[in-house]
Amino acid sequence: MANGALSRLPLAYVGQRLVLMLVTLWAVITLTFFLMHAVPGGPFVSEKMLAPEIEAALNAKYGLDEPIWRQYLNYLGSVITFDLGPSFKYPGMSVNEMIAEGLPVTAQTGLLAVLCVVALGVPLGVAAALNRNRWPDTAVMTIATIGAAIPSYVIATVCLYIFALRLGWVPAFGLDDWRGYFLPVFALSGFWLSFIARLTRSSLLETLDQDYMTTARAKGLKRRKILLKHGLRNSLIPVVTIMGPVIANLLTGSFVIEQIFALPGIGRHFVLSITNRDYTAIMGITIFYAAFLMLMIFIVDMLYVWLDPRIDYRRRA
């Protein structure tokens, strides 16, 4: 980041944002904890009824027999030390280990989806904007509308049936073969690719109609230079804004997509933890997702000062 951008990014503002992130994360922890404990039943209630002595021993082992306020303080203290607690359904396994086990698979699939969204969504949006009301614009917007309207699980199911079961081009489940990434990545990126393409098009069209763009054209600057230096850079601000939540969403996995393709990622662990009533796993993955989402939004806000010289955080600080 250039020195000019750094001068518009005071430490006071950064400190305020970090404090706000911590307060928000505390609110997420508190809300998640009490919601989990408000659900009827308990983590050891299942179809196979346990003997009262065994259930009491398990509650004592995990501190579930203590007052709710003490359980909350104990859990809050554990989270502060980055310990998300033990899994209630997988003896000997902690929630940290569960996340560490599923994160590589989720991150690899999500990173490929992010690259697909950026590498295809932005160019398609630019092509549509530069060919407004012509056939490339119509084709891109038609595909983008269809992609945004169809849910990801429908895309996943249809692609699974056609390309895996009928044609046999890719494996149906798992990531044992590198071809196994195609369908999950396509299903994950379908909606966001369409959304980014539409957003890029509308933002670039708005930028091209600005007075400074008209002035640049009147000065005789080359169209490519106008587009890259002035048009595209300014029109990407809304795209960068939405890319924070998009990256967080894709890199932490889609719960449904990972379940459909039997990927051993964080999303599948989350679905199984809900089914198994594994409260600590539900809370831990929720906290991890919230922290990662806030981190991505923070990074996006820091990138604003590089994209747009008009943005100055010194006034807010």
Image: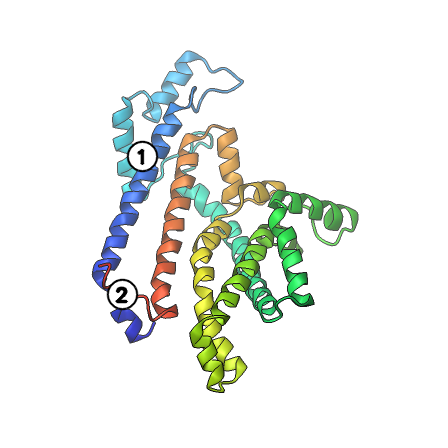
How far apart marks 1 and 2 lie (CA) works out to 31 Å
Residue 275 rendering spot, x and y as whole percentages: 52, 29
Res 177 visible? no
Q: Nearer the viewer, residue 4 or 87?
A: 4
Residue 302 against residue 177 in the figure, above or below: below
Quarter of the N terminus within the rendering: bottom left
Mark 2 crowd level (few <14, some 14–19, many ≥20, 10 Å Cα): many
Residue 102 rendering spot, x and y as whole percentages: 49, 46
Q: Residue furthest top?
A: 52
Residue 76 rendering spot, x and y as whole percentages: 28, 36
Query: Three-letter amino acid code at disc 2?
Result: Leu
Q: Nearer the viewer, residue 275 or 15?
A: 15
> As drawn, is 250 to the left or to the right of 70?
right
Q: Residue at x 60, y 69 (%)?
A: 127
Label 1 or label 2, whichever comes before in sequence order: 2
Q: Residue at x 53, y 54 (%)?
A: 110
Residue 148 against residue 227 in the figure, above or below: above
Quarter of the C terminus within the rendering: bottom left
Name the colouring of the figure: rainbow
Q: Residue furthest right?
A: 166
Q: Nearer the viewer, residue 8 or 26?
A: 8
What residue is pinned by disc 1? 30
> As drawn, is 36 to the left or to the right of 73?
right
> As drawn, is 182 to the left or to the right of 275?
right
What residue is pinned by disc 2? 9
Residue 100 rendering spot, x and y as whole percentages: 44, 47
Query: Three-letter amino acid code at disc 1?
Result: Thr
Tag 1's secondary structure?
helix
Tag 2's secondary structure?
loop
Give the label, 1 or 2, closer to the camera.
2
